[in-house]
Image (cartoon, rainbow, N blue to C red):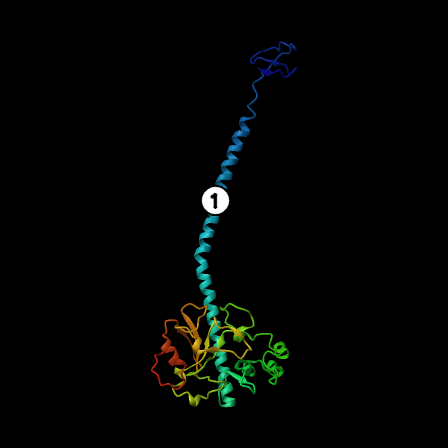
Amino acid sequence: MVPCPYCAELIDTGLSTCPHCQSKLTIAPVAAPDAAAAPSQSSSTVMIWLLVIGGVVMAGICVVGIMIALLLPAVQQAREAARRSACKNNMKRIGLALHNYHEMYNTFPPAYIPDSDGKPMHSWRVLLLPFLNQAPMHAEYDFDKPWDHPDNLAVTRFTPPVFRCPSAPGQTNTTHYVYVTGAGTSFEAGKGIRLAEITDGSAQTLLVVESHDKAVPWNKPSDLEVTELGSSGPATSHLGGFHALFCDGRVQMIPDTISFEELKALLSPSGREAVRDF
């Protein structure tokens, strides 16, 4: 059945005259196309394209994820290499400052300046400030007051970047570059040492070491006691060892495979121990 084009009544297909309005049907009405079929086919096509596009997008996301996973270790290694290089440069600057201090005073600075009772009062790092482009801070610092007096804490509230390893964790006011002090080292009981007293040779004796697990406020007269050393030396965030500044100004990465006896020999200024080259 189809609708008459004149009266819209339903009639059989193929008639020449409408039985309802008697109109001549010069063109026989034909059945209208199934309206539901076309949209169905169109919807199916759209759905297929959406699935294809979605698959391409998901594949792209997977590829990007794989590329990030592959590149991330390389990026992290590159960043650590840059931080490690910056740490080494910090120690070289400290070494140059220590030698300039020695040239002026004919001795390396002691680990600390004591008060009248022998209590540590000021750190060697504060003494080194004029030789690290920090003369204004040194000029404001009051050596008649202890390091933790509010006046001195106000002066030293900003840590000179040269005293911080970029790879080290911890608070921003801490330092990771310390003397090793105590019996058998170059720094005993708050005393400095002259190059002439380092009879083991300046290239075979350590002056400063890097220690991330012994971070202290940079202006505090506190360092690393030789009795606090682990069996493989100071611990750091660097892979494989720690930076060390030798008395000749050289900075070298000391492997964490070093034995405790070798490390003690490097810390001794006049023990005449046989040590290997690093």
Horizontal side of 243 relative to 33 (left or right) equals left
Q: Which residue is at a point 45% across and 54% down the rendered structure image? A: 67
- According to the image, label 1 marks what residue? 56
165, above or below 196, in the image: above
* Residue 101 in sight from this viewpoint: yes
Report the amino acid beneath label 1.
Val
Q: Which residue is at a point 54% across and 73% down the rendered structure image? A: 174
The front one of 86 and 10 is 86
Looking at the figure, which quarter contains the C terminus?
Answer: bottom left
Q: Position of residue 276 (x, y in %)?
A: 34, 79
Q: Position of residue 175 (x, y in %)?
A: 52, 74
SS for tag 1? helix
105, above or below 80, in the image: below
* Residue 278 in sight from this viewpoint: no
Horizontal side of 245 relative to 152 (left or right) equals left
Q: Which residue is at a point 40% across and 74% down the rendered structure image? A: 254
How crowded is the residue under tag 1: few (<14 C-alpha within 10 Å), some, or many (20+)?
A: few
Q: Position of residue 81 (x, y in %)?
A: 45, 68
